[in-house]
Amino acid sequence: MAPGGRLTVRRAILACAAALLAAGCATPRPGEPPSEPPGIRYRCEQGFDFSVLFLDDSAVLDAGPRGQDFLLRDAGGTTPRHTVWSNPRMRAEFGLGAGEREALLHYPLQPLTVRCVRG
């Protein structure tokens, strides 16, 4: 092997070691609370909050101990920023209000409508 080849292998090993160290630093320590779930946070008037992660034609609502809901994009919405998502258990509307920071969660089986605000 040529001397230049050893240097390239050495750089590759050092780069891998640095990547592993960086990954280890990003991992939470035992006993630390888990980081916030990804997505946009909302606070609701019923005393709970959730985060929503929008994907292509779906949204995942994560309410922590209350569980997750996987919603599909629905037709509807009165403005381009007003979007509607649903599954058999719930329907969610986002982009409401003057600042488009409000959301409504509709639970037709209970029946219940919950008002939420981003932030």
Image (cartoon, grey):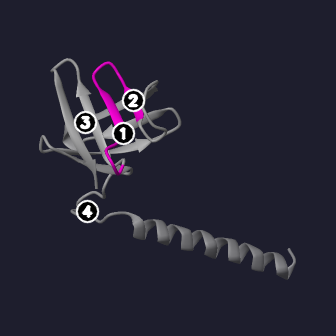
Q: Residue at x 40, y 30 (%)?
A: 84
Q: Which residue is mark 2?
A: 85
The segment highlighted magenta reads 83-99
Q: Which mark is residue 94?
A: 1
Q: Nearer the viewer, mark 1 or mark 2?
A: 1
Residue type for callout 3: Gly
- Labels 1 and 2: the sequence-earlier one: 2
Measured in 3D between alpha carbons, the distance from the residue under mark 1 to the one under mark 3, in whole angstroms, is 19 Å
| Residue 76 spot, x, y in % from top left | 43, 26
Q: Residue at x 41, y 66 (%)?
A: 26
* Left or right of residue 9, residue 37 in this image: left
Residue type for callout 2: Trp
- Are the two marked residues, 1 and 3, in contact with CB atoms closer than 8 angstroms? no
Q: Quadrant of the N terminus?
A: bottom right
Does the magenta segment cover residue 96? yes
Q: Secondary structure at mark 4?
A: loop
Q: Nearer the viewer, mark 4 or mark 2?
A: 2
Measured in 3D between alpha carbons, the distance from the residue under mark 1 to the one under mark 2, in whole angstroms, is 8 Å
* Left or right of residue 77, residue 33 in this image: left
| Residue 70 spot, x, y in % from top left | 37, 31
Give the quadrant of residue 73: top left
Q: Which mark is residue 67?
A: 3
Q: Secondary structure at mark 3?
A: loop
Q: Secondary structure at mark 1?
A: strand
